[in-house]
């Protein structure tokens, strides 16, 4: 397929130059634009605002606030092209504002002289203040006995104070241009009227912090008191009344204060004693009546040379005279009583009793001395009981404690010692009875020519009395074979000597047996049985007729001596005798 391709028309001369110069043209335009932008920037750099601010020909630029379109700006700062609003504000001046159109270059507002701002300060005082003071940097005013004022003042901060007789108030106010500020003082204050039934009386008025507000003579009226609680102190002849009061706003409180007094009459035997308070104040010499004493119960001292100080208690009633009297005691009595107390404190009861005898001689029948004497006697017995107990003699200690408790039945130490000593006393009694039984047995043995040669045997019977044991042994010896003849001898109460003899009437029997026995008391209240079996052999004479005729004559019998060499028959005789008596005793106490 054949395509038509028309031949291009030849370029003209003008067209050629347009094609060649077109890029150069655009480059030229670009250079001009860049130059214009550069010139614009240079011109904007030179577009600045210049100004100064004065107040009464004083430069206040550093104090004033300058704004351009609401943004803070300073003199010499760059600004943009177009419409702007320029404002100047200062607390002490009226505000300044201006609209302008900014073009390239310097914009100089020159010197702007601000006008001083003024405001109104209204001060009121109810009630009238003794002094009102207004103080500011450029204005000050002082008013006396004023209810207030209204003044036009330069705008600034002002101190306003109002002073009254007993209080002052200080406040700070900011006065702005064209505005009115109210400062109102209205303190809550009242008054009190003081009166007293005694004269001359002096009062002191204290605030809640105990600071002195006012003082003076009664009666008095105190005004202009801030509403609050106060304390009134009124003094008359060294007597004082305190009272809490409340001051209310715009009211006068009547405060009557009343001193109440009575009188006291002091007497002494002998008279002439000096009367003192417990604080040492001298009131007079007996007999004396002391007036102006507040109703109370108090102690007073009566003193006279050579006599002990007496203390009396007096109850004083309003508008009455009450009396008190005392019998003074000589110092010899006081000294003896003091010595007795010191001796008793140190445990020297003998010396205390001697001193108390002297005190009772000086003041017969004195209750204090008699009571101390009773205590000293009882305590001396308790002290002696402890000495005996320390020595191991609890029996004697117990007797001392019994005597002491008869005098001092409530003495706790004596009761405690008695309870502690009881077991030891019983033990000691048992030992004593046991020793007594042994001593009696030794005497019985010594009274027998053969006693002491043989071994002593001891048996305890816990469940039977000495009398029961005695009767049981007698019955056993007399009724149970082999029998023995028994002779019983009562030595002391509860202690018995028994001699038992086992002998044959047959003259050909060569042995004889006797038992020496004592029945008494041992430890822990048990019955103690001590016995010694004495064995005899007939004296060998070689004459049968003498042996038959001699019978049981004591001279014919010789005791065996265990300390000497004996035959086996003799040893067996001794052992058999011991076994026999042990069986009889054991059978009797079962």
Image (spheres, rainbow, N blue to C red):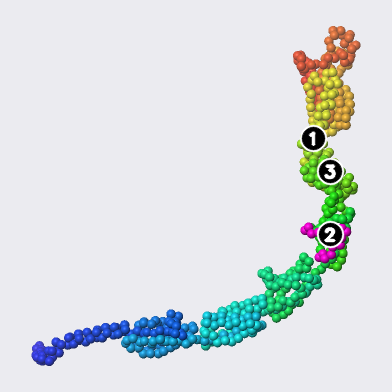
In this figure, which residue is indicated by the disc labeled 3?
A: 355
387 over 322 or under it: above or below: above
Examine the rendering and report whether any part of residue 173 can be seen. Answer: no
Examine the rendering and report whether any part of residue 365 can be seen. Answer: yes
In this figure, which residue is indicated by the disc labeled 1?
A: 393
Query: Would residue 412 appear left or right of 74 to someone viewing this image?
Result: right
Query: Would residue 234 appear left or right of 361 to someone viewing this image?
Result: left
Q: Pointers 2 and 3 in contact (CB under 8 A)? A: no
Label 2: few (<14), some (14–19) or many (≥20) C-alpha neighbours in 10 Å:
some
In this figure, which residue is indicated by the disc labeled 2?
A: 284
On the image, the x and y values in percent for residue 422 come to 79, 39
Occupied quadrant, residue 585? top right
On the image, the x and y values in percent for residue 369 come to 85, 47
* Magenta-drawn stretch, dominant element (helix, strand or loop): strand
Say which element carries label 2: strand
The residue segment tinted magenta is 279-294
User: How many angstroms separate mark 1 from mark 3 (CA)?
Assistant: 30 Å
Label 3: few (<14), some (14–19) or many (≥20) C-alpha neighbours in 10 Å:
many
On the image, the x and y values in percent for residue 340 come to 82, 45
586 over 50 or under it: above or below: above
On the image, the x and y values in percent for residue 408 come to 84, 45
Mark 1 or mark 3: name the one nearer the start of the chain. Answer: 3
Query: Would residue 321 appear left or right of 242 to someone viewing this image?
Result: right
Task: Identify the residue at image location x=80%, y=69%.
Answer: 259
Mark 2 or mark 3: name the one nearer the start of the chain. Answer: 2
């Amino acid at each position: 397929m054949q395509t038509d391709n028309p031949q291009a028309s030849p370029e003209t001369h003008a067209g050629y130059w347009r094609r060649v110069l077109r890029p150069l043209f655009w480059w030229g335009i670009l250079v001009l634009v860049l130059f214009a932008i550069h010139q614009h920037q240079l011109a904007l750099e030179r577009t600045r605002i210049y100004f100064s601010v004065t107040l009464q020909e004083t430069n206040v630029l550093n104090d004033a606030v300058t704004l351009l379109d609401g943004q803070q700006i300073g003199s010499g700062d760059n600004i943009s092209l177009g419409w702007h609003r320029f404002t100047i504000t200062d607390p002490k001046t009226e505000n300044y504002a201006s609209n302008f159109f900014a073009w390239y270059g310097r914009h100089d507002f020159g010197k702007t002289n601000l006008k001083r701002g003024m405001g109104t300060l209204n001060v009121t005082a109810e009630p009238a203040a003794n002094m009102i003071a207004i103080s500011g940097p450029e204005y000050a005013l002082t008013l006396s006995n004023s209810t207030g004022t209204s003044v036009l003042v330069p705008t600034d901060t002002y101190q306003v104070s109002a002073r009254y007789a007993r209080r002052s108030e200080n406040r700070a106010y900011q006065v702005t241009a064209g505005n009115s500020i109210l400062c109102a003082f209205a303190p809550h204050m009242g008054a009190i009227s003081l009166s007293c039934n005694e004269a001359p009386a002096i009062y002191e008025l204290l605030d809640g912090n105990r600071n002195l507000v006012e003082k003076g003579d009664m009666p008095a009226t105190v005004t202009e008191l801030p509403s609050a609680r106060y304390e009134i102190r009124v003094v008359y002849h060294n007597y004082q009344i305190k009272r809490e009061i409340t001051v209310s706003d715009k009211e006068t409180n009547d405060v009557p204060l009343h001193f109440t007094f009575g009188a006291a009459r002091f007497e002494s035997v002998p008279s002439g004693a000096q009367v003192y308070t417990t604080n040492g104040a001298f009131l007079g010499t007996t007999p004396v009546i002391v007036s102006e004493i507040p109703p109370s119960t108090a102690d007073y001292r009566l003193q006279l040379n050579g006599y002990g100080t007496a203390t009396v208690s007096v109850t004083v009633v309003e508008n009455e005279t009450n009396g008190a009297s005392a019998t003074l005691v000589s110092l010899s009595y006081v000294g003896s009583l003091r010595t007795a107390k010191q001796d008793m404190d140190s445990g020297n009861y003998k010396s205390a009793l001697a001193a108390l005898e002297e005190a009772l001689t000086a003041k017969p029948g004195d209750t204090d001395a008699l009571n101390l004497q009773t205590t000293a006697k009882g305590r001396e017995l308790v002290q002696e009981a402890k000495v005996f107990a320390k020595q191991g003699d609890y029996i004697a200690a117990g007797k001392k404690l019994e005597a002491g408790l008869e005098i001092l039945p409530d003495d706790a130490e004596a009761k405690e010692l008695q309870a502690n000593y009881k077991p030891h006393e019983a033990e000691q009694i048992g030992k004593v009875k046991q020793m007594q039984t042994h001593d009696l047995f030794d005497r019985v043995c010594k009274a027998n020519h053969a006693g002491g040669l043989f071994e002593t045997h001891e048996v305890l019977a816990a469940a039977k009395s000495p009398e029961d044991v005695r009767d049981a042994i007698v019955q056993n010896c007399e009724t149970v074979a082999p029998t023995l003849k028994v002779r019983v001898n009562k030595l002391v109460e509860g202690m018995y000597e028994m001699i038992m003899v086992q002998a044959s009437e047959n003259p050909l029997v060569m042995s004889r047996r006797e038992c020496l026995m004592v029945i008494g008391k041992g430890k822990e209240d048990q019955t103690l049985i001590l016995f010694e079996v004495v064995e005899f052999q007939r004296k060998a004479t070689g004459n049968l007729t003498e042996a038959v005729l001699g019978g049981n004559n004591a001279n014919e019998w010789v005791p065996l001596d265990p300390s000497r060499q004996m035959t086996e028959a003799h040893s067996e005789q001794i052992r058999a005798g011991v076994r026999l008596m042990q069986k009889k005793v054991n059978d009797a106490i079962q």
